[in-house]
Image (tube, grey):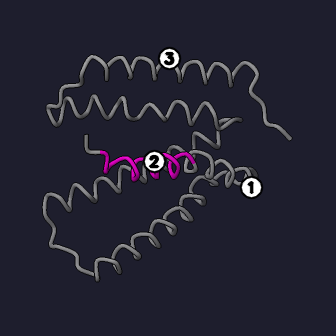
Amino acid sequence: MDVRWMLPAIGTLFFWAFYGVLPKMALNHMTHLADAPRRVMIWEWLGGTIVAAGILIWLRLQISAPTPAAVLGMLTGITGLVGALLYMVALRDSPLAAPVVAFTSLYPAVAVFLSYVLLRERPTPMQWAGIFLAIIAVALISAGSANGGDVVE
């Protein structure tokens, strides 16, 4: 069994876990500003630009001409950043991060559906069961947040 994907996947898990919490921490420092999500996004974009610049240097500034792959890559960036902005707004409007993080963590279930429609991939019964259980988990986490979750001071 090829497991070369596992180490990058573990890294992704931890980076995205921090991505779920760091914006709420930043927004908590800007509660007096109505446009706080946009301000936090500017800093996020700056961080992303630093990473992109590092990758360009690593690739020795070689960028290919626009191709379908390049267009899809740019669409990936656009959808990711628009999603991040909406995520910031949801975090700003929620007293707790947990329900927002839990609900938005269902995006893999939507991705499986999109893979079915756009890529003609066929999820296995085990994958459908996983999606069902993920929905239950999100409902339980969100209900727990609504019924007693609080900020520890």
Q: Amino acid at mark 3?
A: Ile
Q: Is 6 in the magenta?
A: yes
| Secondary structure that dominates the magenta span | helix
Q: Earlier in the sequence, mark 3 or mark 1?
A: 1
Label 2, on which residue? 10
The residues tagged by marks 3 and 1 sit, at their Cα atoms, a distance apart of 32 Å
Label 1, on which residue? 29
Q: Earlier in the sequence, mark 2 or mark 1?
A: 2
Q: Earlier in the sequence, mark 2 or mark 3?
A: 2
Q: Which residues are magenta?
A: 3-17
Q: Position of residue 80 (x, y in %)?
A: 39, 51
Q: Amino acid at mark 1?
A: His
**Image marks 2 and 1: residues in contact by CB distance under 8 Å:** no
Q: Of residues 115 and 91, which is closer to you in this image?
A: 115
Task: Give the structural element (helix, strand or loop) at label 3.
Answer: helix
The residue that appears at 62% across and 46% down in the rendered structure is: 21
For label 1, the crowd category at 10 Å Cα-Cα, with few meaning under 14, some 14 to 19 and many 20 or more, is few
Please indicate whether residue 71 sits to the left or right of residue 145 in the image: left
Label 3, on which residue? 136
For label 3, the crowd category at 10 Å Cα-Cα, with few meaning under 14, some 14 to 19 and many 20 or more, is few
Please indicate whether residue 34 sits to the left or right of residue 11 in the image: right
The residue that appears at 71% across and 35% down in the rendered structure is: 95
Task: Give the structural element (helix, strand or loop) at label 1.
Answer: loop
The residue that appears at 48% across and 49% down in the rendered structure is: 84
Residue 59's place in the image compared with 103, above or below, is below
